Image (cartoon, coloured by chain):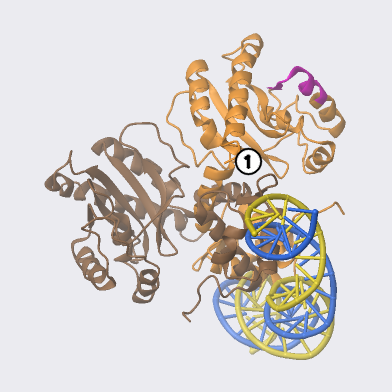
Chain colours: A orange, B brown, C blue, D yellow
Amino acid sequence: MTAHDRETSDGTVGRTLAVLDLVAEFGRPVRFAEIMPRAGLPKATLYRFLQVLANQDMLLFDEDRQTYAPGMRLVRLAHSAWAQSSLAPLAKGIIDDLADRIGQTVHLAQLDNGAVLYVDKRNARQPVEMFSQSGKIGPAYCTGVGKAMLAHLSDARLEQAISRQSFHGHTPRTITTPEALKAELALIRDRGYALDDEEHEAGIACIAVPILSKSGRMLGALSVTTTTAATSRDQLLALAGPVTDASAAIAAAAEAWRFPETKQ
Amino acid sequence: MTAHDRETSDGTVGRTLAVLDLVAEFGRPVRFAEIMPRAGLPKATLYRFLQVLANQDMLLFDEDRQTYAPGMRLVRLAHSAWAQSSLAPLAKGIIDDLADRIGQTVHLAQLDNGAVLYVDKRNARQPVEMFSQSGKIGPAYCTGVGKAMLAHLSDARLEQAISRQSFHGHTPRTITTPEALKAELALIRDRGYALDDEEHEAGIACIAVPILSKSGRMLGALSVTTTTAATSRDQLLALAGPVTDASAAIAAAAEAWRFPETKQ
DNA sequence: CGAGTTGGTTCCATTATTTGAAACTTGGTT
DNA sequence: AACCAAGTTTCAAATAATGGAACCAACTCG
């Protein structure tokens, strides 16, 4: 039993929110019977939890199809969360600049419960399609931003995060063991940036840097993604400079934001 | 005591989520003492609720400043909610078309707890800035989309929604009484579209239509916004046609989505 | 300096809520 | 008509939530 897995502690509220996660993970409306086996809760208990969540608009219950899906209240709450707690609002200008300058896809990510949470994105040229991208999650062990963030975690938090990785071999180059990952993280820490060279998806490479506060706290990560077809490894490495600069600028903005006035 | 105000029923979970809303409403990180008076809960209870929420990443607690703000877990959950439960994904193409054709700001909204929840938006020309817009809420009684939706609510739900309106007089034209609102809603139901003629903001007008399922259920609303400076009332009214068509197309898409196969 | 104040945290006996096995209802299938 | 699966309700026992009060800073002020 690790310190506190969100699920088990926190009494009724924690258990209920775990069910919410479960429903969200399906990615489609689900029926009671589909949730049951995964929830590991007595029928009656799960039933009551779902009722409460639906009542609370945290879930939307479709009467006709008898399915549950994440509800609209979450969208409203997330708006608030994104605006206040994510790096996105204060990084906006900096990311715009970076994307303009290098003309490639840019991702801004934060770490959420051991997974990569994308909080903002700029596509190479087409109009931004944000909410459908912002809020999306991805694996940490095989993405540039993921590794960049893991590399700057405290030992305890790293262990916790590693225990949540699934280490699925997406491509032949995917890192699939905790040991190999730790070695890679040490390297990343040394050179200051992470590479994802077709570890997650064939033909896709990216360079990522962590966003670190003055005191060394890991706030998030920034990456530029390219296709191996269009961009050589050297060209990709050449982006390290601009991306690192942008990352530093975001860190500075975060610092300024969190301590806006000296004393007053 | 009305049937079920989300707050009071639903036991511990409901009460805890009410606190989450409370924090989100502030729109900025807040301290314990600021939440206290509004929560109407004993100190110890509120304290525990906040602890649990922070533990669950539903809130983010800033150790240094001792403040709570909505947490990143909400962003992840909302992504799921937006993709599955909102009209946005299936309306996307239709809205793109509409915005292209008429070149004005377009809003797609749904009703959430008596308030307008914007789920998608197209700006007149500049790149979309979505998450900062999607998830945003606004008043129902003085916006086009709000009135369009209220007009197609069942009596019971309408009463419930009206009881949640604040009826603040934003401009000289704002409707400020439930009676006047009900009269306006009858008119809207008759003619099929709602107008907001500088009721919310001076210089801003909009035309909105409800999105109704075949069975008459109100799914959301669609609006086009213009400035009174650039667009005459007649020009605005001329948009009723295209907007209504788009709304019908969205309703059809929703219908098709919810009943994809006949029997299989 | 020390008494007072505000903001935050912890205790713990009481109480109300949650719990879940089992019974029941509903709707569909053979 | 009997059967089965999915979903809903019941109710006594078990547990977890409750909140008044005490406690602990960290400031402020006389």
Q: Is residue A182 above or below residue A7?
A: above
Res. D19 image quadrant: bottom right
Number of numbered callouts drawn: 1
Q: Position of residue B171 (x, y in %)?
A: 25, 55
Res. B192 image quadrant: bottom left
Q: Mark yes or no: residue A133 visible.
A: yes
Q: Is residue D9 above or below residue A246?
A: below
Closest to the observer, A50 or B36? B36
Q: Which residue is mark 1?
A: A137
Instruction: Give me the residue at 52% from left, 16% from top.
Output: A102
Q: Is residue B96 magenta?
A: no
Instruction: Give me the residue at 34% from left, 69% from top.
Output: B153
Res. C25 image quadrant: bottom right
Subunit under mark 1 = A
Q: Position of residue A140 (x, y in %)?
A: 71, 35
Q: Mark yes or no: residue A8 visible.
A: no
Question: Is residue B144 toward the left or the right of residue B76 in the image?
Answer: left
Q: Position of residue A33 (x, y in %)?
A: 66, 65
Closest to the observer, A121 or A191? A191
Query: What span is colored magenta in the figure?
Result: A186-196
Q: Position of residue B34 (x, y in %)?
A: 57, 58
